[in-house]
Image: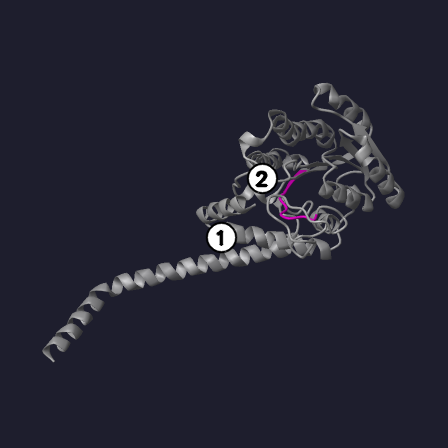
Amino acid sequence: MAAVDSFQFLYREISRSCSGYFETLALVGALYTASKVVILLRDCCMLVRVHFLPRMIPTKKLTQRFGDWAVIYGASQPIATAYAEELARHGISIIFVTQDHTVLRDTAASISQNYAVETVVVLADFSLDQAASKPIKEAMRGKDIGFLVNCLDESLASPQSLMEIPEQGLLDLVNKNIAVATLMTRMVLPGMVERSRGAVVNISSGACCRPFPGRVALTASTGYMDHFSRALHLEYSSRGIFVQSLIPFQIAKSLQDLPSSSFTPTPSSHSWFVPKPDIYARHAISTLGVSNRTTGYWPHTLQYGLMRCIPEWIWVLGSRVFVSIS
């Protein structure tokens, strides 16, 4: 009994002396929990504000808010073609900038016929010299350019280490995704600033969120496009220019259920988390003027939120396992 009484006495003394620490720890835990709840509520409110309210509340026409013409660079990518078609559905005429007009000739004719808008295909090979910008400036002359859409060129169909990429292929990848996208933005900005309205949309990839082995050049390009967009928005938002960074995740390869991926494997067909390009474009355009950095599609925003919760060391370990078995 003496041993038991001594233990109970010791326990009471320790509890009395540590009660202040317990209360402090409880307060810290309560504050931490409250902060997480506030962050969760904030993210839910932002999800509703960006992805749902714009689709439910009528707004001014895109032509009134931004302009009558759009310049699309990188339209060989299915997502850019779908974005251009969605703009045309809103009555916006399209200027396609491409290195191979045969790829877009039929697309441009189809859009023009289906939506009663004008379409122009400009052949410009920036691998030659800066003179490639001349036909683009000529095509834009006298037009109310309200949109510029730069779409990332995902040339690497499968993971490759940096040493496996041919030098010319690497130069082309960096030139298309960084140099030309920046130059295209430089070309349209003067007219937008003069009219005090316009939208620049840079479509990259959710790959900018985390490093991924085997896609070094591609993920670096997405990181540049994302940071470039955010910095440009800070610089020109006060002058009426809305700059948006779109960072989608998996998008189906074509309008016909064929799978594709920005940087991860896709299932055998489109799904809720892997939308067809036209569905994604419809969602993404509704976020114009609402959020300057978004996935453009609310299930992808859920994916992005989950990705932020994963520690980077776990992400790196998982990506290495994926590369080793692919």
- Which residue is the site of mark 2? 159
Marks 2 and 1, how far apart at CA: 25 Å
- Which residue is the site of mark 1? 309
Describe the element under mark 1 as helix, strand or loop.
helix
Which residue: 74% across, 37% down? 76
Describe the element under mark 2 as helix, strand or loop.
loop
Query: Whole-percent x and y of residue 106?
Result: 85, 38
Location of residue 166 by image quarter = top right
Number of numbered labels in the structure image? 2
Mark 2 residue type: Pro
Q: Is residue 74 left or right of residue 48?
A: right
**Badge 1 density bin: few <14, some 14–19, many ≥20, Cα 10 Å:** few
Query: Whole-percent x and y of residue 314?
Result: 46, 49
Query: Whole-percent x and y of residue 185?
Result: 68, 30
First to last magenta residue range:
242-252
Q: Is residue 65 left or right of residue 23?
A: right
Kindly report which numbered mark, 2 or 1, lies closer to the viewer in this rendering: 2
**Badge 2 density bin: few <14, some 14–19, many ≥20, Cα 10 Å:** some
